[in-house]
Image: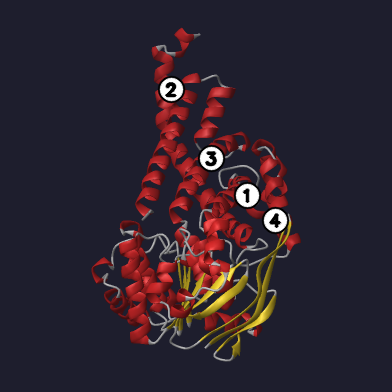
Amino acid sequence: MLNNLFSPDTLNEAWVIIRAEFPLAIWETVYITLLATACSILIGLPLGVLLVAGEKDGVLPLPAWLLKGLNAVINLLRSIPFLILMILVFPLTRLIVGTVVGTTASIVPLVIAAFPFVARLAESSFREVSPNTIEMAQSMGASPLQIIGKVMIPESIPSLISNATIAITTILGYSAMSGIIGGGGLGKIAINYGYYRYKYFIMLAAVVLLVVLVQIFQTVGTRLAAKADKR
Amino acid sequence: MIEIKDISKQFYTEEGTVEALSHVSLTVEDGDIFGIIGMSGAGKSTLVRCINMLERPTSGTIRIDGCDVGALPERQLRELRRSISMIFQGFHLLMQRNCLKNVCFPLELAGKNKRESREKAMELLNVVGLGDKAKAYPAQLSGGQQQRVAIARALATDPKVLLCDEATSALDPATTNSILELIRNINQKLGITVVVITHQMSVVEKVCNHVAILDGGQVVEQGRVSDVFSHPKSEAARRLVFPEGNPHSFYAGEEGVALHA
């Protein structure tokens, strides 16, 4: 089998497929990942704020039932395996996108899986802001919204960037999984060629590219976080 | 004038109720530098936080220039807090902002014009002797410098009152002296009333005109610094004035008491 795998014929065939399909697949993966991350941050970041600010002795206390409900929903969504979640949210996906297969359709389950994760990451970033700093702002007459906008968020920017990097690499992994339901990108290629058609080499190439993408995202994220941090 | 009347504060913890303050009454005159001294856990920090309602007293009233602070609605309380600045033991600067922007912070909260705020902040940084550090970030400064920036920030909104919560406790003696000198200057030049919370007698000695001694959540002694220092009446006062023990104090043990008697 190994002889077959790396025979000139196989390699030639693989090379043709790689050249034909990979550029689009890389683009799709980056597109899905970035768009899904952006949407998850859009939903998750405000929730992260509420999780911290909404506590009993936070700056913007929420009713206890609301905070409990929010925590429960986040935990619930986080406990469903992504593979199953993708299928569970089919009705919602159809409602929003009109179809359940394809690249754009895969963004819906990705966001639903990722925003609770992002909310937890944001929560942990905001908890790093010292209560003393918040008290300082209160002593100067800052309103709850000013404390959130001018203290909590700006003071945790470096940590938020680090955590966004974690989110992006996780979402990249999920996006590859969405290849199962026809979501485009490197994941689809790896599954279609590697799993369904035993083209091992193609799958390997797709995996290598995914690794490279993670490395790039992580390196850029780490640098940005370090640059943003003035401590 | 700050009138603290019969303030008590209870904290409810899992182990039960802790009485942090018990029937504290004090009056701080305008333009005074008033020291509140006590050992750790005596309730000083709680007391100073009651003045601007960061901590709500369980009972009693605080009046600032006749206005009952505890009765103010949120919005007006926030307005009032702009005229009662506070500096802290840990400085609490915003670490992701440079010094100039830190000093601008309270002005930004008050919705002041950006350009004017920057000018004012620059002026204040010069007052505290850090005009050249405007673009530096707090992490690049020493503790003493950070406290100077915090003082500049505290002065930005032209406060009537400056509350200092152990403001020099994290600093070495030389830096402590320079910060205390700065506080005294500010008091004299701008006429700002200053309340100094400390556990160090030397701090009170250097800057305060009046002092109250807090022990176990109660004021055990108060008056002019010179009087309290020369004739400490309470045990807590003696403990603070003679921390090492004094031949005439109770702390010399049975014999000391006998000799003194």
Under mark 2, the amino acid is Ala
Mark 3 or 2 closer to N-term?
A: 2
> Which secondary structure lies at badge 3?
helix
Under mark 3, the amino acid is Thr
Q: Residue furthest left?
A: B132
Q: Which residue is mark 2?
A: A14
Q: Position of residue B121 (x, y in %)?
A: 33, 76
> Which secondary structure lies at badge 2?
helix
* Quadrant position of residue B208: bottom left
Mark 1 or 3 closer to N-term?
A: 1
Q: Position of residue B229 (x, y in %)?
A: 46, 74
Is A24 left or right of A116, judged from the image as shown?
left
* Quadrant position of residue A84: top right
* Distance (Cα) linking label 1 and label 2: 39 Å
* Distance (Cα) linking label 1 and label 3: 13 Å
Q: Position of residue A68 (x, y in %)?
A: 73, 56
Q: Would residue B193 be seen by someone viewing this image from the given angle?
A: yes
Q: Which residue is mark 4?
A: A70
The residue depicted at 47 percent of the width and 45 percent of the height is A165
Give the number of the mark in front: 4 or 3. Answer: 4
Is B214 left or right of B180, judged from the image as shown?
right
